[in-house]
Amino acid sequence: MNVSIVAAGTLCGRISPVGMGSSEDRALLEQLRDKTDASLIGVGTLRAENPEMRGSGGNLSEKRLRAVICGSGDLPVAGKRLFAEGPRPLVFTSHARVVSLTDSLGDVAEVCGIGVGGHGLSVAAAIAELARRGARSVLIEGGGNLNYAALAEGVVSDIYFTVTPFLSGDRQAVALADGPGPLGEPFVPLTLRSCRQSASGELFLHYQVAWRADDV
C-alpha cells in the first residue's frame, strides 16, 4: 500500500490557515487524487473547509473512496458538500461511537469502527480498511494531527509539500505534522525525489519517507 501526505504551507512549515496555495498547487492536488484510490482527512479539516476531494476537471469518481477519521463523534454535516455529492463517504470512528454516529448520519455516510493507535484512532487501521475495500494507494489530505499520527504509526510512504512564498510565525498555527514530541530520534529521515520551482514563487517538493537507515 502506498500512502502519501499532501499539503501546502509556509516557509516555516505552517499549513494553516488553508488556501495559501496557488492554482498550480490546486492542480497538483487534483492530479494526485487522480492517481490514488482513496483520500483520508481528519475531522478538523472537514470543520475548517468544505472538501469534496474532486480530481482534475472537477471529476468525482464513483469508484474512488473518500474517508474522514473522527474520534470525537462530533462530525459537521450541514452544508458540507462531501455528504451531498458523489459516492457516500466513509467515516472512521471508535467502536463505541459507531451506533450513535450511524443513527445521526443516516444514509449520508457509512460509519466504520476502528481501534485506537498511539495518537488517537489508529490511522493504520483506517488504511487497512481502505485496502480491504480495494484501495492500493491512499492520499492523506490533512490536517497536522492526522499527518503526525500517520507518520508516528509508520504508514506514510511519500510526502508532497508545496512551500508557498509566505512566513507565518504564529506558534498557534497548525504545522505539517503536529504532535506531542519528536517523530524520530529526533527526526524522520526523508529522501528528496523531486523539487520544482514555479513562477508563483512556490517550491513543489516530493520526499520519500525512509524508515530504516539503509533506506536513505
Image (cartoon, rainbow, N blue to C red):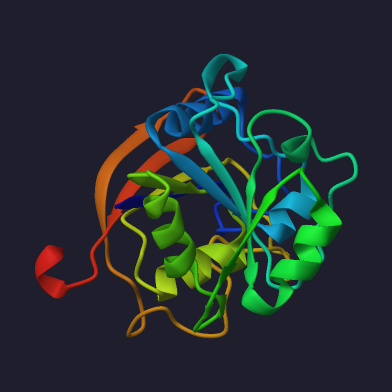
Q: Identify which residue is drawn at 43% across, 33% down.
A: 32
Judge whether 96 appears above or below 131 on screen.
below
Residue furthest left as drawn = 214
x, y percentage for residue 114? 55, 71
Compared with 182, 202 (above or below) is above
From the viewer's perspective, tell me whether residue 112 is left or right of residue 74. Answer: left
Please provide percent x and percent y for residue 145: 60, 68
106 with respect to 161 (left or right)? right
Q: Where is residue 155 in the image (x, y as percent from the top left)?
A: 36, 64
Say left or right for 28 vs 194.
Answer: right
Query: Would you say residue 141 is visible in this rendering?
Result: no
Give the camera-side residue of 164 and 23.
23
> For residue 102, what is the image quadrant?
bottom right
Apparent side of residue 35 relative to residue 118 in the rendered image (left or right) = left
Q: Residue at x 49, y 22 (%)?
A: 199
Q: Is residue 176 visible?
A: yes
The C terminus: image quadrant: bottom left
Q: Which of 56 and 123 is in front in this view?
A: 123
**Which residue occupies 90% across, 45% down?**
78
Which percent across, then down, holds residue 207? Answer: 31, 51
Residue at (38% x, 53% y) in the render = 132
Q: Which residue lies furthest to the right in this view?
A: 78
Asked where in the image residue 71 lies, by quadrant, the reply is bottom right
Whether residue 84 is situated above or below residue 73 in the rendered picture? above
Total marks placed: 0
Q: In this view, does 18 lie above or below 119?
A: above
